[in-house]
Image (cartoon, rainbow, N blue to C red):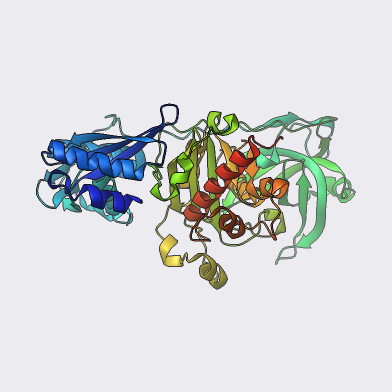
Amino acid sequence: MNEQEFLARVRGSEGLRRAVLRAVEVDRAAKTCLFELVTDAAYTEEDERTAQEAAQAAAPAPFRAEVKLIKLVADAQLVRGKIRDFLAATRSAAAACIAAEDIEVTAGEPVRFTLGVDATERMFLERDERLFPDLIRMLSRNFCGSFEGAFADKVKEQRTAGEEDEDEPPVQQALPVRTFAVTDFEPIDEPDVPRLATYIADCDFQSSSLTVCGEITYIQERETQKGKRYLRMAINDSTGTLGFSYFPRKRTEEKISALKTGDWIVCTGANELYNGSLGYTARFINRGRAPEGFVPEKRKSKPVPARYMRVAPEHFTDYNQLNLFEQGALPDDLVRNTFVVFDLETTGLNTSPASGRMDAITEIGAVKIIGGEIREQFSTLVNPERKLEADVVKLTGITDDMVKDAPKIAEVIPDFYKFCDGCLLVAHNAPFDSKFIRYYGEAEGYMFEQKVYDTVSIAQSFLYLNNYKLNTLADHYGVVFRHHRAADDALATAKIFIEMIKAKKCLPKA
């Protein structure tokens, strides 16, 4: 029995005709399933018996069903509070604009609510096409009846300087750059330069005086359109490669001309924006190198965000996979660990910027396994900031129109990092998805360093199939899903992962 069938049976009772299912809680030790129902009407003992019978029919043997009925009317104060909580958790910009007094709620069928905004706020917030659908979906899960929402014009007083707003989003913490001491220094251009070099991997900020040190991997003499000679060079310090231009001085031209690939140099110059991109120009070049046996220190991650800003997880209940509740103890590895099973849709297959332009993420889908059960889900489209190729659109069904107003990856990564905090990661063909999430995570200062389990390699270790594609494994375990959409692929992968670990009795050894 799925959710729709369960509710149809419950709503056949007069006092529960508008009931909604808020949650299902499973206690494996006691072998009970608690169904939490919300109704806005007075209910009788007969209504309770109807709900109990429907719940028992939905619960798998040998679990005993219990029903908790809650009478909750969607009054203005409760609805207003839920809207404020939801905005604070998922829409920081809207939460900063909309105070409790800006939300008007009118009881009726449907319940109508308005968000009071001024002209500037409205122009900004209307870009979020999912704002009202997401609000209505949230309210429908918590209250009976239907809902309608809209903006309302409102003139607001300007906030005075220094006045604080407790809903203001937290300031993003900048990561300190890593440096190493330059050794074997020999002056060419200028002896009085800093002797600490910044890791090339960390040179993602503007600076009028930035010192880097690395091995020359490329050097070529060129001329400007006006015939002025300059060098185009690239150096590598084992954390990254930096390309730059350098205009030689006459007094040091001979020593500069002696430089060749394989030599180590230390450069001081400017890292500035050119046409929207950072570009480095060396002013001084000297000889110098990293310390003997230099091993780059791992970059520390930004702290886990205090709250979700753009994408918040949702509670997940799946009534079509009641075999997840079947009898038999789950392996300890599955119960005592928390897993995030994720899948990505992308603009292509290039996982390394060294091979050309890195492909972009267009969708993230994930579910969280807690105590051996799928309990939460995280899903969002992502604006890749580039046009999608026709074959990608055909494969995934994701179009340019679908992603044009979606959040960019820099806005999504902090929320996904928070969702994954304290969890082991799981993916199908994990090396592919992991490279994307680690690359774009590191670009924003979030280091995804958790252990990642690959359902392909797990399946290959004990199943004998023609191939180990996701749809092949899904067919093997009887999992029905829509392929090539991140949320559906992640859910299918999670179900397959649970079944495989149940069969193997433990997680694969590292």
Number of numbered discs: 0
Between 188 and 74, the residue placed more toward the observer is 74
Residue at image coords 61%, 50% = 428
Locate residue 273, reporting x and y percent.
Answer: 57, 50
Between 395 and 73, the residue placed more toward the observer is 73
Locate residue 124, reporting x and y percent.
Answer: 30, 53
The correct choice, above or below, for 483 with respect to 309 in the image is below
Residue 211's image quarter? Answer: top right
Mark yes or no: residue 414 visible: no
Q: Is residue 419 left or right of residue 93?
A: right
Furthest toward the front, the residue is 62
Locate residue 57, reporting x and y percent.
Answer: 33, 45
Between 98 and 276, the residue placed more toward the observer is 98
Mark yes or no: residue 356 visible: yes
Residue at image coords 24%, 45% = 20
Furthest toward the bottom, the residue is 390
The correct choice, above or below, for 56 with respect to 275 in the image is above
Locate residue 196, reporting x and y percent.
Answer: 72, 30
Q: Is residue 360 left or right of residue 37?
A: right
Q: Is residue 429 left or right of residue 493?
A: right
The correct choice, above or below, for 44 with respect to 432 in the image is above
Q: Which image quarter is the C terminus in?
A: top right
